[in-house]
Structure formats: C-alpha cells, structure tokens
Amino acid sequence: MQKPQLDKILIIGTGGLALSFSTALVKCGIYNVYSEGSNSKKTNEFCRKNKTVNFNALEDKNDLIILLAVPDSQIEICAKKYAKFGKLLVHFSGTTPLEILTKYLNNAAVCWPLESFSKSKKVNLSKITCVIGSSNDYSHNILFDLINSIKAKYIILNNEERMKLHLTAVMLNNFTYHLFTLIKNWTKNEELDLTLLNGLFKSTISSLNKDDEGKNQTGPAKRNDQEVIKQHLELLKNYPALQNIYMVFTKSIIDKYSN
C-alpha cells in the first residue's frame, strides 16, 4: 500500500504532552503544526512559544492528522468535535480504547508514550518508546511516518495489553513518586538528611533491574520483627498517610515471606 502524504497536524491541547510533541514535530520540519486549546489566550501564548500556528488561522481545515493531547475524559468529546477535519484521529491514552475514536472516524490510532509529561519540561521524544495501535493499515502508515519523523521508538500492543502496561506504569511510577514525596516531607519535618540514603537508594534501584524474584528483600517486615514495626508505626503517628502505606507494605511483605 502506498504511504499517504499528509503534512498538516492539529494538536488539541496546550499541556505538557502537547508541548513535547509540538516541539518535536516543528523541529523535524516535515509538518505544518497547528494548535487548538480550550482557552484562546493560553493557545495564542502556546503558539508563540512553540512556533505552531493557531488553528483559527488555518483556511483549509481538511485532511488533518489530529492529535488529541487531552485528558482521558475529554478524548471522546474532542473526537466528536474535530473528526470532520481529520484524515486520522490519534489519542495518547494508556487506558482509553481505540474504538472511542473509530465511532467518529474510521482512520484512528493510539500513541501512548511511556513517559511522564508536565508543562515545566520538554521531553526528548527520541529517547522514549511509544505504545501504538491503529484501526487499519492506512492509519498505521500515517502514524508510522509521524513516529519516525520524531525518531521515537515504538511497540505495537492491543487495547488490553496497553491497559495492563499502563497499570504497571502507574504503580511503578506514580505510586513510587507519591511515596517518595511523603518520605521527603517526613525527613524535612523531622530534620533528617535524606541525602545520607542516596547510596541505599541507588542500590535498591540496581536490585530492581535484576531478575532476583524478591530474593534481595530485606527489612523488619521480611524478618517479621514486630517490635521494630511497632516502633516505626509509633514514629509515624503524626503522618497518617505514610503510616497507612507502611502498614499496607508491611502486611504484604509479611504475607509473601511467611510461608
């Protein structure tokens, strides 16, 4: 099948995801990149900073590759609104089914990047992997060209596989980050120097990259040392969120290693 030649991309959204993708797409020089957001002032500012063109200034609003860089709750709303302009609809969600898009346009795809995005930083997309899926060969070819243009890596997964990987990412990344934030708050309030544990932290990360199946697990929960556990819980009595997490993890570890 001949690859389609489309050079106009509309990115819906002005957040961190839109920031990184618009930057990469403008830089590659292959596409004319347009932006659309829910707030006209923010959209104009986004266009100025990132060298995209406001969608309102585009005269021929047909044959667009439409990238929905919006929260999951807004994907279908935006798909319904903008599908009439598109040759391809793409969303970036780890959990939203592809079929949400094909209700409004037959040519649809998913491009979920395995990275966290925020407005405070631009992600180098050439260093990440995108999980992709498409409704047909035509859609795949368009998305494949786009992925190659920004030099990103990719892996093809179906809806269920992508959702399972997303769950894994949430637990590994979001949960760990939240735990670390609570710990930083604890050490700050208790006037402790967290940097003293940098070596231990690096050792833990190194252990996670080894196929040890938990053989390197240590600590009072692994030993079922109830006296130490009791002391720890007492120290955390003024930090209920961290205390609850401590109890959940402790029980899980005891249950795993008590047999």
Image (tube, grey):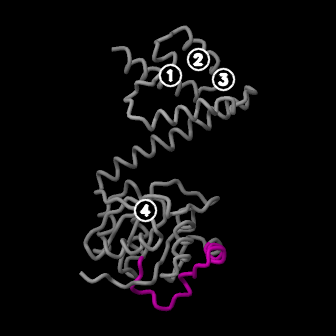
What distance separates the C-alpha of mark 3 from that of mark 4? 40 Å
- Could you tell whether 140 is left or right of 119 in the image? left
**Residue 96 on the magenta segment:** no
Position of residue 222 relative to residue 43, above or below, is above
Mark 3 crowd level (few <14, some 14–19, many ≥20, 10 Å Cα): few
The amino acid on which the numbered mark 1 sits, given as a three-letter code, is Met
The residue identified by callout 3 is: 238
Residue positioned most to the right? 191
Which residue appears at 60% of the width and 71% of the height?
39
Indicate which disc, 2 or 4, sits on the residue closer to the N terminus: 4
What secondary structure is found at the residue carrying circle 1? Answer: helix
The residue identified by callout 2 is: 233
Residue 13: give its label: none
What distance separates the C-alpha of mark 2 from that of mark 4? 41 Å
The stretch of residues the image draws in magenta is 43-65
The residue identified by callout 4 is: 92
For the residues labelled 4 and 1, say whether their Cβ atoms are less than 8 Å apart: no
What secondary structure is found at the residue carrying circle 3? Answer: loop
Between 172 and 86, the one nearer to me in the picture: 172
Which residue appears at 35% of the width and 62% of the height?
132
For the residues labelled 2 and 1, say whether their Cβ atoms are less than 8 Å apart: yes
The amino acid on which the numbered mark 2 sits, given as a three-letter code, is Leu
What distance separates the C-alpha of mark 4 from that of mark 1? 35 Å
**Residue 47 on the magenta segment:** yes
